[in-house]
Amino acid sequence: MAQTDEFGEELADFVRRVAELKAARSVPADDLPTVLDAAIFELDHVAGQLWPWYESLSSTGPSGVASIDRQEQQLLTALFQRVPVPVALVDRETVVRRLNFAATSFTGVRAGYATGRPLTGFLAHADRAAFRSQAAAVARGEGDRSLTVHLQQQPAVPVRATLTALRPSGEPRTAVLVVLQPADSLVPSPERVPGPVPTLTETTRHAALMDLVDAMTTALLSGPVGDPSGVLERAAGVLHGRFADWVVADVAGTARLSRTTVLAPSDSVEGARGVAAQDPAACPLVVEAARGGSTALPVRPEDPDAFGRDTSGAPILVRANVTSLLCVPLTTSPGPVQGVLTLFRSGARQAFSMAEAQAMDMMSRHLSLAMSAPART
């Protein structure tokens, strides 16, 4: 029974990776060879592993799991945490189980935040499918792997990821040990390891946020009210560039949402046209915000289809290289949702913080009041 369950999980993992490879077709042309290699590898896995496993499943017996001494296990745990090389322990789906001290400094991600989240969420979109596929292969016992990836916060710096299988004590599943290091150096130097954000930077960001709130209030008070599309267009102009790389505004009509404004980076003209032509009803995040009236703040969104697809069939979040987004319903409490404002940040730009989300929530209420106010004559 255990073997049957394991085969079912393996097959489900394969189906998920195939879906991710399909979504990865929209990555830049230079990254397509990596995606193609991963697809060929998955086909080999089906032919060489899954099918023979299915044929011999009835004769497969349970396997025992060796135990190790408790003191030795504690020693290994301490060694894992203190080794001066960035190391992460993940499962076959790349979900982080442990992150050592060096890895938290190298990636800039706290261990408590990373645990329970896929390690692929901290990588560039183009590298995720290949990394997930290689991690699954290592977990199946097909040998160690090594590939070059890029962290979302430092996309210009190549990182060498080395993967090896590890069977934790008392567990039936094989985990994957991931060692990270700069591609041009064996050991990350302290100068290249990002440190904690200084207090001065936090103060500067807070001042910039207050300037944004002031600019939004000025724009709303100095322009006409009662025109939802006009109000959203002015608000989008304030937010675009200084606060978000992309601004998408949808107005709630009597029957359905309609897209009124799309502001994108200057080098994403074609992408902006695709987003403008999209039906808001095809955006799960927008539909959920309009229906439930709650703000969504996904950091490194894992689901590439969370904002739907453009006219070419490519996931918008992948095509825009979205690393963080805010999806804010425009409503006053109590009252219906009058629209939805969605903000994207892409590339190496810092993700939206909780403080920024709170400020945006306050501005959304002001926007809603301006949209519903009677027009001035």
Image: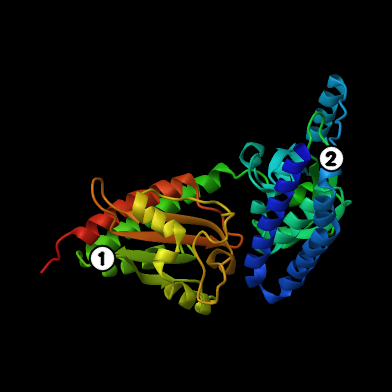
> Quadrant of the rendered structure where residue 221 is?
bottom left
Image coordinates of residue 281 in percent, x first then y, are 40, 64
Which residue, given by chain and number where applicable, does mark 1 sit on?
A: 228
Mark 1: secondary structure: helix
Amino acid type at circle 1 is Pro
Q: Secondary structure at mark 2?
A: strand
Precedes in sequence: disc 2 or disc 1: 2
Q: Nearer the viewer, residue 104 or 299?
A: 299
Is the residue marked by circle 1 packed among few (<14), some (14-19), or many (20+) residues within 10 Å? many
Q: Quarter holding the N terminus?
A: top right
Determine the residue positioned at 63% across, 44% down.
117
Which one is nearer the viewer's eye here, 128 or 149? 128
Q: Nearer the viewer, residue 4 or 112?
A: 4
Q: Nearer the viewer, residue 139 or 48?
A: 48
Give me the disc on residue 301: none
Q: On the image, which quarter does residue 330 sit in?
A: bottom left
Mark 2 or mark 1, whichever is nearer to me? 2
Question: In this orientation, does residue 243 appear?
Answer: no
Amino acid identity at mark 2: Leu
- Relative image position of residue 169 (x, y in whole percent): 82, 30
Q: Residue at x 79, y 64 (%)?
A: 43
**Is 13 displayed left or right of 287 in the figure?**
right
Residue 259 visible at all = yes
Check residue 166 in the rendering and tell me which mark sits there, or answer none.
2
